[in-house]
């Protein structure tokens, strides 16, 4: 049908291709006088010409068919679906701009859930959702039907081993239980408080003072990434790698960790058989991954062996008992058979916690400072809150309080509810983990009616959720910390609407610590400096699992005058 149809279309459009040749004793020729000037056409040539015309017609027919098919698919799915490559061309085009905004628009168009069709043989086929009902279903109600899954585990196993991030079932439960007890212990809280005081006042202050003193531009994101990397290593391994030392040195362990994470992320968009073949042949990115993991392992092994020696030395039992880093805690535990955990398992636990806590708070703080720069009203309100809280100190009443020397107390940080709201608001708009992933292990149906086959991959679009009018109302794109406040107190939101920290049994284990850390760092910087983003600095997200700013956050630090702070104190 198509061939007939296009054949007649063709003869109208290109009549010269359809002239009827006349047979003449072995030679094909036209009877027209003009044709007499043309060289005679042999039977072979004539047939070839006919064949060429047929091929052209078929190709054209196929092309028309393809275009109609793609237009129909676009109407049905919101995106063109091409043979073999599926929706990939649209995804690649979108990735050149802001991919997350593109996903948000698609989800809005599809009322919260759509199906992405990837190229053949890749792992890009998935259901993408931003519907809180579906989130509650997969993160809590039917938690066991939506594990991380074998695809995720297989992809991350070289770097993360059997650690909490990729683990499911008992392996996950065991680590979650022990770490959860530890994270809620008074000992752990004390360690986090002390480690932050040390990092902020002995390291961060000196680095910032150096840049401010020289009126030099600083990449605040880089500085914050160094701070949280050092901090999480103190918590996981009980050692400080020193990324935030003067001169901001490159630390081989930190670099190896970053490289290993970046290559692991690339695996997610590479066909599995391709990266596995490259790993087998030790080529390209897989070679780099192997080298980086080796460096991470060497560092971990060194720390583990040193700690083992420390623990076995009877001379310091008191000091060792007081250590509350995760490595020491897990080293003292025994498995079901009463045996100590293997060095490999200890390494996996620590590496996973470093991954979970290394960049999430620092990128959140970077977006927070960028938003503050554009919203001086919010900045003033936070300063007023800080002023009011430290103004309650005894010393504030009796003598001059030096804001440039302030060391906040844990109970003061807890009282900073508007700051808590402002950080939550920054995370709503710029969640540190913009999309997350699950796999369906048995056929199921989402509360919104989406049918899910076993093995389907689910992407929940946390960034898009923060921009859904259906969840946050018409002003969802505005930075408005007040939406979190009721009668002057911070009001939390359901984890299935505000999913920046995940939800259900796999809720972020470091959430309370992360808030404490972010509030402490933000209040310490804000009370000393005004953070002014360099005019014209382009802020855009980087395509990675964590929501980094692609070009960092270039700022100038302007020292606050003592009188300026007093003004804020008087406001209350
Ligand atoms: C702003 C800061 C943070 C944000 C937005 C955040 C967000 C998240 C998210 C979305 C997950 C779920 C990931 C997944 O399962 O795929 C998660 C899990 C986790 N987070 Fe955080 N996180 C933050 C800080 C931290 C910190 C500082 C630590 C530790 C020191 C930490 C430890 C963990 C752990 C251990 C898990 C795994 C929980 C499990 O699977 O049971 N997080 N976090």
Image: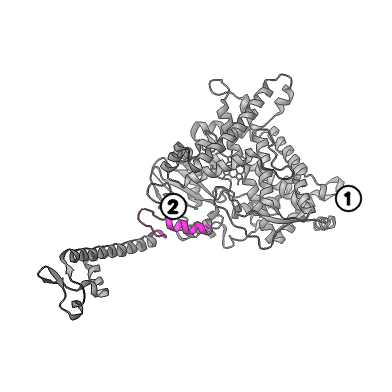
Upstream in sequence: badge 2 or badge 1: 1
| Position in image of residue 260 (x %, y %) | 56, 41
- In the picture shown, does residue 244 fall above or below 172? below
Helix, strand or loop at label 1? It is loop
Counting from the top left corner in percent of width and height, residue 376 is at 72, 61
* Image coords of residue 10 (percent x, y): 25, 71
At mark 2, the secondary structure is loop
Using a 10 Å C-alpha cutoff, classify the residue at mark 2 as few (fewer than 14 neighbours), some (14 to 19) or many (20 or more). some
Q: Nearer the viewer, residue 263 or 545?
A: 263
Q: Which residues are magenta?
A: 76-98
Label 1: few (<14), some (14–19) or many (≥20) C-alpha neighbours in 10 Å:
few
- When asked about the image quadrant of residue 237, the answer is top right
Q: How many marks?
A: 2
Whether disc 2's CB lies below 8 Å from ligand 1 is answered no
* Depicted 562 relative to depicted 273: above or below: below
Q: Find the residue positioned furthest to the bottom.
A: 33
Q: Is residue 48 left or right of residue 249?
A: left
* Quarter holding ligand 1: top right
* Relative to 3, 92 lies left or right: right
Task: Establish if 384 lies above or below 207.
Answer: below
The answer to whether residue 245 is visible is: yes
Query: Which residue is outermost to the left?
Result: 25
Labelled disc at residue 448: 2
| Residue depicted at x 15% and y 78% | 31
Q: Name the residue tied to disc 1.
A: 400
């Amino acid at each position: 049908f198509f061939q007939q149809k296009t054949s007649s279309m063709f003869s109208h459009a290109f009549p010269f291709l359809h002239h009827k040749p006349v047979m003449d004793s072995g030679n094909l020729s036209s009877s027209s006088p003009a044709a007499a000037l043309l060289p005679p056409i042999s039977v072979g040539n004539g047939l070839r010409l006919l064949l060429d015309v047929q091929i052209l017609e078929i190709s054209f027919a196929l092309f028309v068919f393809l275009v109609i098919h793609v237009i129909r698919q676009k109407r049905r799915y919101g995106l063109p679906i091409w043979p073999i490559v599926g929706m990939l061309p649209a995804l690649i085009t979108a990735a050149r701009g802001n991919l997350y905004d593109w996903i948000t628009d698609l989800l809005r168009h599809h009322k919260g859930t759509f199906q992405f069709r990837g190229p053949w043989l890749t792992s890009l086929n998935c259901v993408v959702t931003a519907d809180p009902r579906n989130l509650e279903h997969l993160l809590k109600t039917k938690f066991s039907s939506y594990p991380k899954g074998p695809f995720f585990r297989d992809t991350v196993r070289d770097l993360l081993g059997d650690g909490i991030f990729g683990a499911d079932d008992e392996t996950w439960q065991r680590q979650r239980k022990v770490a959860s007890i530890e994270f809620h212990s008074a000992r752990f809280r004390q360690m986090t408080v002390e480690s932050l005081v040390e990092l902020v006042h002995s390291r961060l202050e000196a680095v910032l003072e150096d840049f401010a003193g020289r009126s030099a531009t600083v990449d605040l994101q880089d500085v914050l990434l160094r701070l949280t990397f050092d901090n999480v290593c103190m918590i996981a391994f009980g050692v400080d790698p020193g990324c935030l030392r003067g001169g901001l040195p490159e630390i081989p362990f930190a670099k190896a960790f970053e490289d290993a994470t970046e290559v692991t992320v690339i695996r997610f968009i590479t066909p599995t058989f391709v990266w596995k073949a490259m790993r087998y042949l030790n080529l390209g990115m897989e070679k780099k991954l192997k080298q980086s993991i080796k460096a991470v392992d060497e560092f971990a092994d060194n720390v583990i062996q040193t700690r083992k020696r420390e623990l076995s030395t009877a001379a310091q039992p008191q000091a060792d008992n007081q250590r509350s880093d995760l490595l020491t805690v897990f080293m003292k535990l025994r498995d079901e058979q009463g045996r100590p955990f293997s060095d490999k398992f200890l390494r996996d636990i620590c590496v996973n916690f470093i991954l979970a806590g290394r960049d999430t708070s620092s990128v959140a703080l970077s977006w927070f400072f960028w938003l503050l720069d554009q919203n001086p009203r919010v900045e003033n309100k936070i300063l007023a809150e800080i002023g009011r809280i430290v103004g309650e100190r005894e010393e504030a009443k009796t003598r001059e309080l030096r804001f440039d020397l302030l060391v906040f107390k844990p109970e003061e940080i807890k009282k900073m509810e508007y700051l808590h709201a402002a950080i939550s608001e920054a995370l709503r708009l710029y969640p540190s983990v913009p999309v997350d992933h699950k796999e369906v292990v048995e056929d199921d149906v989402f509360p919104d009616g989406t049918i899910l086959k076993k093995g389907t991959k689910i992407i929940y679009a946390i960034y898009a959720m923060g921009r859904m009018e259906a969840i946050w109302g018409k002003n969802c794109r505005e930075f408005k910390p007040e939406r979190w406040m009721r009668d002057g107190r911070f009001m939390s939101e359901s984890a299935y609407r505000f999913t920046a920290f995940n939800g259900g049994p796999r809720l972020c284990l470091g959430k309370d610590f992360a808030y404490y850390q972010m509030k402490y760092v933000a209040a310490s910087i804000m009370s000393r400096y005004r953070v002014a983003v360099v005019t014209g600095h382009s802020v855009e997200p980087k395509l990675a699992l964590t929501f980094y700013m692609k070009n960092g956050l270039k700022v100038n630090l302007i020292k606050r005058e003592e009188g300026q702070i007093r003004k804020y104190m008087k406001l209350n």
